[in-house]
Image: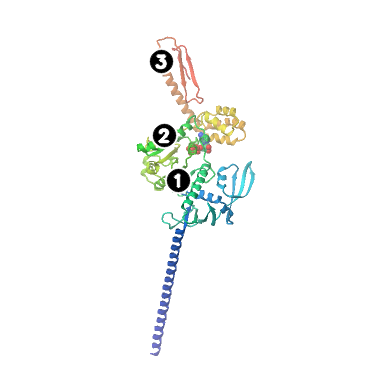
Amino acid sequence: MKKQLSQTIRKMVGLKSTILRFFMVFQGGILFSFGKYLTDLLSGTWDLFTTMVRNKIMTTLEIISSDDRDDLFHPMFEWLSKQSGIQNTNNLQLLTKECAINDYFTKAENSGHEIHSEKKVSRYNNSYLERYTFTLSEGKHQFHYRNKKIHVEYELFLDEVPDESTHYFVPIKDDYQVYKLTLTAYGDQKKLFQEIIKEALELKREMGKKSSNIYLMNKFADAWKRDVSEAKSIKMGFVILKKGLAEHLVNDCRQFLGRRQIYTRLGIPFKRCVLFYGDPGCGKTTTVRALAGELGLPICIMSLSNKELNDDRLLTLMNKAPRPCVVLLEDVDSCFVQREASDKKDHNRVSFSGLLNCLDGVGAQEGRLFFMTTNHIERLSPALIRPGRVDKKVKFQKADKHQAEGIFLKFFEGHPKLAKQFADKVPEDRMSMALIQQHLLNYFDEPEKCLQKIDELIRECEKSEEFQRLEKKKYKLKQKEIEKVKSREKEKLDTLDGETKIIDVEIQNEIESNNVIKKRRITNPKQMIDLK
Ligand SMILES: Nc1ncnc2c1ncn2[C@@H]1O[C@H](COP(=O)(O)OP(=O)(O)OP(=O)(O)O)[C@@H](O)[C@H]1O
């Protein structure tokens, strides 16, 4: 009985202590949570208060680098690096760069930075410049602009970045590096910041003139990324096309760009679409790049066979492209073989209707110059290339005499005689410009050898199946032409009543490689003409 009682008392005491312990922990938890809530509230209120005070007495300008826009970050960074106050700081970053001498793009890139050391080095007969410069480093800096002190904070975001619209932090995608520049000055300095922005914009224009202005799709195919490889923009003089074609294309584009008001007045979408078709390596892509360079427009290049690209992303890209700009859609045949193909809609790919929406959509109507390229025009759906959708079709053929001579002169400027001989040797419309370029590159320093060795290349080409096919085609066309001329002459002879007359027969045989005009003088009309 005693034992039982003592056990019951012990149990009750144990229970009580458990309850007591539980309450103590609970109480502690409540106190901790309350404390945390209170400190959060206080720090939040403090942040709000300091932000309000800062906004009242200071002006702040934030610039965030972003890969999907033609933003002001890089020009602003360049501009800041030029400011003497920034250069005087002890908080600098070393930028090591090697560039080809006379590489104006790289020079422009580094123009503002204090040069720590510069050394000329020679490698494989090329001169390079090894340059060590100081640039803005991460952290806080300050400088004076128009007698006002400006504080600069340069931050790098590795995991998250503040979203522009919501201001919440959002995760950064894999291949993005996001930087932020914050400029702060006391007082209402909006005007001062506007001046700074103006100067940065001017610098951006300068940089834009010298850089490539090429935009490529990013890894996710949902945004444009400026091509930072040191590819420069090329001009029309770089490509050697059939006589008159380059001028025609430039004039056509210039005319279009100058007709915005006419298009608007007539209610026609302000866009132009040109299809370049023909053999590979004949200069379709290069011509589009050169046209963009000549017109001083940015060029956005996209390959429709990219697996990441789909209809939605294509539209997004179109809306995000700079305006006006040149849009190059490469190898359109690879995705849009036939209209029916769109029925089997693959969600990871661009559908036929997706491309049509992209060409006809609102995003396309802002002075966009579309260029589509294909090696197989016959595979394209007629709906894609109908008038109104495609305004112009240009065929790119293999090199003619004029092109062969031009490209030889491009490599060996001081050898016009050799260039003529070279062009005489190259068979018309049999070799692509890319193939001839490869040959010229093989004998870069030896123009005579280059001329001599072209015979070997021609012999090799003659063995190829394509060459044989083209030869057969040429033979058939020639036969047809001869038949036509024969029947025309026969008709004329039948109407001559046996009189002796002089007939000049002119055959401009386009199929003939040298475009020679053949003349036959026939004194006796009754004589049979053999033109073979
Ligand atoms: N007309 C040309 N003038 C100068 N260079 C040319 C010309 N055509 C081709 N090339 C040279 O050949 C290479 C390939 O040219 P490009 O890519 O423009 O050809 P393409 O017709 O677009 O070929 P593909 O159909 O295979 O895409 C480039 O390096 C370019 O320099």
Asked which secondary structure carries label 2, the reply is strand
Expressed as whole percent of the image width and height from the top left, the position of residue 146 reads 52, 51
Residue farthest bottom in this picture: 2
Comparing 31 with 21, the one in front is 31
- In the rendered view, tell whether residue 347 sits above or below residue 58: above
Report whether 456 appears left or right of 377.
right
Q: Residues within 10 Å of mark 3 (few under 14, many from 20)?
A: few
Query: Which residue sits at x=49%, y=43%?
Result: 214
Tag shown at residue 492: 3
Expressed as whole percent of the image width and height from the top left, the position of residue 337 reads 40, 39
Q: Amino acid at mark 2?
A: Lys
Specify whether residue 333 is in view.
Answer: no
Query: Which residue sits at x=41%, y=83%?
Result: 13
Comparing 194 with 272, the one in front is 194
Q: Which label lies toward us, 2 or 1?
A: 2
Earlier residue among tags 2 and 1:
1
Specify whether residue 108 is in view.
Answer: yes
In the picture of the structure, the residue carrying the numbered disc 2 is 392
Expressed as whole percent of the image width and height from the top left, the position of residue 431 reads 52, 32
Q: Amino acid at mark 1?
A: Asn
- In the rendered view, tell whether residue 266 sits above or below residue 201: above
In the picture of the structure, the residue carrying the numbered disc 1 is 306
